[in-house]
Image: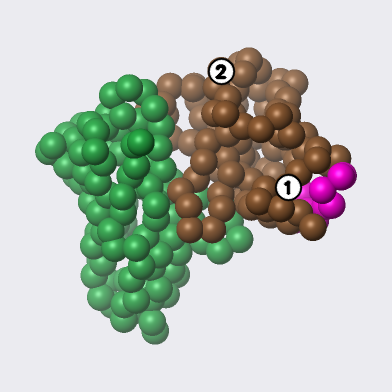
Amino acid sequence: GQQLNQSPQSMFIQEGEDVSMNCTSSSIFNTWLWYKQEPGEGPVLLIALYKAGELTSNGRLTAQFGITRKDSFLNISASIPSDVGIYFCAGPNTGNQFYFGTGTSLTVIP
Amino acid sequence: ETGVTQTPRHLVMGMTNKKSLKCEQHLGHNAMYWYKQSAKKPLELMFVYSLEERVENNSVPSRFSPECPNSSHLFLHLHTLQPEDSALYLCASSWTRYSNQPQHFGDGTRLSIL
Protein backbone atom coordinates (compact mmCIF):
# COMPACT_ATOMS: atom_id res chain seq x y z
CA GLY A 1 0.00 0.00 0.00
CA GLN A 2 0.89 3.66 -0.14
CA GLN A 3 3.62 4.77 2.19
CA LEU A 4 5.49 7.99 2.66
CA ASN A 5 9.09 7.12 3.35
CA GLN A 6 11.19 9.65 5.17
CA SER A 7 14.94 9.73 5.16
CA PRO A 8 16.94 9.66 7.27
CA GLN A 9 15.02 7.88 10.02
CA SER A 10 17.06 9.69 12.67
CA MET A 11 19.76 12.34 12.82
CA PHE A 12 22.21 13.40 15.51
CA ILE A 13 23.86 16.71 14.69
CA GLN A 14 25.89 19.44 16.34
CA GLU A 15 24.27 22.74 17.13
CA GLY A 16 24.85 25.15 14.26
CA GLU A 17 24.86 22.52 11.54
CA ASP A 18 22.41 22.52 8.66
CA VAL A 19 19.89 19.66 8.34
CA SER A 20 18.37 18.08 5.26
CA MET A 21 15.64 15.49 5.17
CA ASN A 22 13.31 14.18 2.51
CA CYS A 23 10.05 12.40 1.96
CA THR A 24 9.26 10.16 -0.99
CA SER A 25 6.11 8.55 -2.26
CA SER A 26 5.25 5.89 -4.78
CA SER A 27 2.40 8.04 -6.12
CA ILE A 28 1.86 11.66 -7.07
CA PHE A 29 0.86 14.08 -4.32
CA ASN A 30 -1.19 17.27 -4.65
CA THR A 31 -0.01 18.92 -1.45
CA TRP A 32 2.93 18.46 0.85
CA LEU A 33 2.75 19.40 4.52
CA TRP A 34 5.60 19.35 6.99
CA TYR A 35 4.92 18.95 10.71
CA LYS A 36 7.11 18.90 13.80
CA GLN A 37 6.22 16.94 16.91
CA GLU A 38 7.96 17.55 20.22
CA PRO A 39 7.82 15.07 23.10
CA GLY A 40 4.46 15.08 24.85
CA GLU A 41 2.83 17.30 22.25
CA GLY A 42 0.86 16.95 19.06
CA PRO A 43 2.28 17.69 15.59
CA VAL A 44 2.52 21.36 14.67
CA LEU A 45 2.33 22.52 11.06
CA LEU A 46 5.57 24.10 9.83
CA ILE A 47 5.16 24.57 6.09
CA ALA A 48 2.52 23.81 3.44
CA LEU A 49 3.36 23.38 -0.25
CA TYR A 50 0.73 23.36 -3.00
CA LYS A 51 2.55 23.44 -6.34
CA ALA A 52 5.29 21.37 -7.97
CA GLY A 53 8.62 23.15 -7.67
CA GLU A 54 7.36 25.48 -4.95
CA LEU A 55 10.00 26.59 -2.46
CA THR A 56 8.73 28.04 0.83
CA SER A 57 10.55 29.27 3.91
CA ASN A 58 9.52 29.69 7.51
CA GLY A 59 12.38 31.28 9.41
CA ARG A 60 15.33 28.89 9.29
CA LEU A 61 13.19 26.21 7.66
CA THR A 62 12.88 25.79 3.91
CA ALA A 63 10.80 23.16 2.16
CA GLN A 64 10.39 22.28 -1.50
CA PHE A 65 7.69 20.49 -3.46
CA GLY A 66 9.57 18.11 -5.77
CA ILE A 67 9.19 18.53 -9.52
CA THR A 68 8.06 14.93 -9.95
CA ARG A 69 5.37 15.54 -7.26
CA LYS A 70 6.51 12.32 -5.61
CA ASP A 71 8.87 13.90 -3.13
CA SER A 72 9.48 16.84 -0.86
CA PHE A 73 12.46 18.17 1.04
CA LEU A 74 12.91 20.04 4.30
CA ASN A 75 16.05 21.92 5.25
CA ILE A 76 16.87 23.53 8.58
CA SER A 77 19.73 26.00 8.66
CA ALA A 78 21.96 26.68 11.68
CA SER A 79 20.21 24.19 13.96
CA ILE A 80 19.57 25.03 17.60
CA PRO A 81 18.63 22.75 20.54
CA SER A 82 14.92 23.61 20.30
CA ASP A 83 14.83 22.07 16.81
CA VAL A 84 14.77 18.68 18.52
CA GLY A 85 11.72 16.61 17.65
CA ILE A 86 10.23 14.34 15.04
CA TYR A 87 9.55 15.84 11.63
CA PHE A 88 6.69 14.39 9.59
CA CYS A 89 5.73 14.92 6.00
CA ALA A 90 2.08 14.46 5.06
CA GLY A 91 -0.33 15.08 2.27
CA PRO A 92 -3.04 13.82 -0.08
CA ASN A 93 -2.27 11.88 -3.22
CA THR A 94 -4.24 12.31 -6.45
CA GLY A 95 -6.71 9.74 -5.14
CA ASN A 96 -7.46 12.14 -2.27
CA GLN A 97 -6.10 9.71 0.30
CA PHE A 98 -4.21 11.46 3.11
CA TYR A 99 -1.00 9.97 4.49
CA PHE A 100 1.61 10.75 7.10
CA GLY A 101 5.26 9.86 6.69
CA THR A 102 7.30 7.60 8.92
CA GLY A 103 9.07 10.56 10.53
CA THR A 104 12.64 11.80 10.94
CA SER A 105 13.84 12.11 14.51
CA LEU A 106 16.24 15.01 15.04
CA THR A 107 18.61 15.35 17.99
CA VAL A 108 20.71 18.49 18.30
CA ILE A 109 23.79 18.25 20.46
CA PRO A 110 24.71 21.57 22.12
CA GLU B 1 -0.93 25.61 20.26
CA THR B 2 -4.17 25.81 22.24
CA GLY B 3 -6.62 25.78 19.31
CA VAL B 4 -7.34 22.07 19.81
CA THR B 5 -7.68 20.80 23.38
CA GLN B 6 -7.74 17.15 24.35
CA THR B 7 -8.67 15.65 27.72
CA PRO B 8 -7.53 13.75 29.59
CA ARG B 9 -3.82 13.96 28.74
CA HIS B 10 -3.16 10.54 30.26
CA LEU B 11 -5.49 7.60 30.81
CA VAL B 12 -4.84 4.19 32.30
CA MET B 13 -7.64 1.69 32.06
CA GLY B 14 -8.34 -1.99 32.34
CA MET B 15 -9.57 -4.04 29.43
CA THR B 16 -13.11 -4.19 30.80
CA ASN B 17 -13.46 -0.47 31.52
CA LYS B 18 -15.42 2.09 29.54
CA LYS B 19 -13.96 5.56 29.14
CA SER B 20 -14.19 8.48 26.74
CA LEU B 21 -11.64 10.82 25.20
CA LYS B 22 -12.69 14.38 24.54
CA CYS B 23 -11.53 16.87 21.94
CA GLU B 24 -12.57 20.50 21.57
CA GLN B 25 -11.48 22.90 18.86
CA HIS B 26 -11.69 26.68 19.14
CA LEU B 27 -10.71 27.43 15.53
CA GLY B 28 -14.10 27.48 13.86
CA HIS B 29 -13.17 24.47 11.73
CA ASN B 30 -15.74 22.19 10.13
CA ALA B 31 -13.80 18.93 10.01
CA MET B 32 -12.39 16.87 12.88
CA TYR B 33 -10.25 13.76 12.98
CA TRP B 34 -9.09 11.00 15.32
CA TYR B 35 -5.63 9.51 14.82
CA LYS B 36 -3.75 6.74 16.59
CA GLN B 37 -0.01 7.13 17.03
CA SER B 38 1.95 4.05 18.04
CA ALA B 39 5.69 3.87 18.51
CA LYS B 40 7.68 3.37 15.31
CA LYS B 41 4.58 3.72 13.11
CA PRO B 42 3.13 6.53 11.01
CA LEU B 43 0.01 8.22 12.30
CA GLU B 44 -3.03 6.11 11.55
CA LEU B 45 -6.22 7.93 10.60
CA MET B 46 -9.18 6.42 12.45
CA PHE B 47 -12.20 8.64 11.82
CA VAL B 48 -13.11 11.82 9.94
CA TYR B 49 -16.10 14.02 10.66
CA SER B 50 -17.30 16.85 8.48
CA LEU B 51 -20.05 19.12 9.82
CA GLU B 52 -20.83 16.53 12.50
CA GLU B 53 -21.27 13.75 9.94
CA ARG B 54 -18.90 10.81 9.88
CA VAL B 55 -17.38 10.69 6.42
CA GLU B 56 -14.58 8.22 6.92
CA ASN B 57 -14.02 5.17 9.10
CA ASN B 58 -10.78 3.43 8.35
CA SER B 59 -11.57 -0.15 9.39
CA VAL B 60 -11.40 0.70 13.06
CA PRO B 61 -12.58 -2.02 15.50
CA SER B 62 -16.01 -1.44 17.00
CA ARG B 63 -14.52 -1.13 20.48
CA PHE B 64 -13.73 2.45 19.38
CA SER B 65 -16.89 4.51 18.96
CA PRO B 66 -16.67 8.15 17.86
CA GLU B 67 -19.25 10.85 18.51
CA CYS B 68 -19.42 14.37 17.12
CA PRO B 69 -22.30 16.31 18.73
CA ASN B 70 -21.29 19.60 17.04
CA SER B 71 -18.49 20.96 14.91
CA SER B 72 -16.46 21.99 17.96
CA HIS B 73 -16.52 18.75 19.93
CA LEU B 74 -15.41 15.22 19.19
CA PHE B 75 -15.43 12.21 21.48
CA LEU B 76 -13.92 8.76 21.25
CA HIS B 77 -15.74 6.23 23.42
CA LEU B 78 -13.67 3.25 24.45
CA HIS B 79 -14.82 -0.14 25.69
CA THR B 80 -13.28 -3.58 26.05
CA LEU B 81 -9.92 -2.42 24.72
CA GLN B 82 -6.92 -4.64 24.12
CA PRO B 83 -3.29 -4.10 25.19
CA GLU B 84 -2.33 -3.30 21.59
CA ASP B 85 -4.65 -0.30 21.79
CA SER B 86 -2.16 1.44 24.07
CA ALA B 87 -0.99 4.48 22.11
CA LEU B 88 -1.20 8.23 21.79
CA TYR B 89 -4.60 9.30 20.44
CA LEU B 90 -4.52 12.59 18.60
CA CYS B 91 -7.42 14.78 17.61
CA ALA B 92 -7.10 17.25 14.74
CA SER B 93 -9.29 19.76 12.93
CA SER B 94 -9.25 21.62 9.62
CA TRP B 95 -11.38 24.20 7.81
CA THR B 96 -12.92 21.57 5.58
CA ARG B 97 -12.51 17.86 5.08
CA TYR B 98 -10.73 18.40 1.76
CA SER B 99 -7.47 16.63 2.08
CA ASN B 100 -5.25 19.54 1.05
CA GLN B 101 -6.31 21.50 4.12
CA PRO B 102 -3.64 21.60 6.86
CA GLN B 103 -4.79 19.93 10.04
CA HIS B 104 -4.26 21.41 13.49
CA PHE B 105 -3.55 18.89 16.22
CA GLY B 106 -4.18 18.67 19.93
CA ASP B 107 -1.51 17.36 22.28
CA GLY B 108 -3.10 13.94 22.49
CA THR B 109 -4.26 11.50 25.13
CA ARG B 110 -1.67 8.93 26.16
CA LEU B 111 -3.70 5.73 26.67
CA SER B 112 -2.37 2.70 28.52
CA ILE B 113 -4.35 -0.53 28.69
CA LEU B 114 -3.55 -2.80 31.58
Q: Amino acid at mark 1?
A: Gln
Color scheme of the displayed model: by chain
Q: Residue at x 82, y 52 (%)?
A: B13
Q: Amino acid at mark 2?
A: Val
**Quarter occupied by residue B78:** top right
Q: Quadrant of the C terminus of chain B?
A: bottom right
Q: Residue at x 87, y 45 (%)?
A: B16
| Left or right side of B10 for A5 | left
Q: Residue at x 57, y 40 (%)?
A: B35
Please, which chain is the residue tagged with disc 2 on?
A: B
Camera-nearest residue between A32 and A61: A32
Chain corresponding to brown in the figure: B
According to the picture, the residue beneath numbered tag 2 turns out to be B55
Chain corresponding to green in the figure: A
Residue B78 in sight? yes
Which x, y percent locates residue A57?
26, 50
According to the picture, the residue beneath numbered tag 1 turns out to be B82
B107 is higher (above) or lower (below) than A1: below
For the magenta stretch, what is the residue range? B7-17
Residue A56 in sight? no
Which x, y percent locates residue A74?
26, 54
Crowd around label 2: few <14 · some 14–19 · many ≥20 (10 Å): few
Q: Are marks 1 and 2 on the same chain?
A: yes
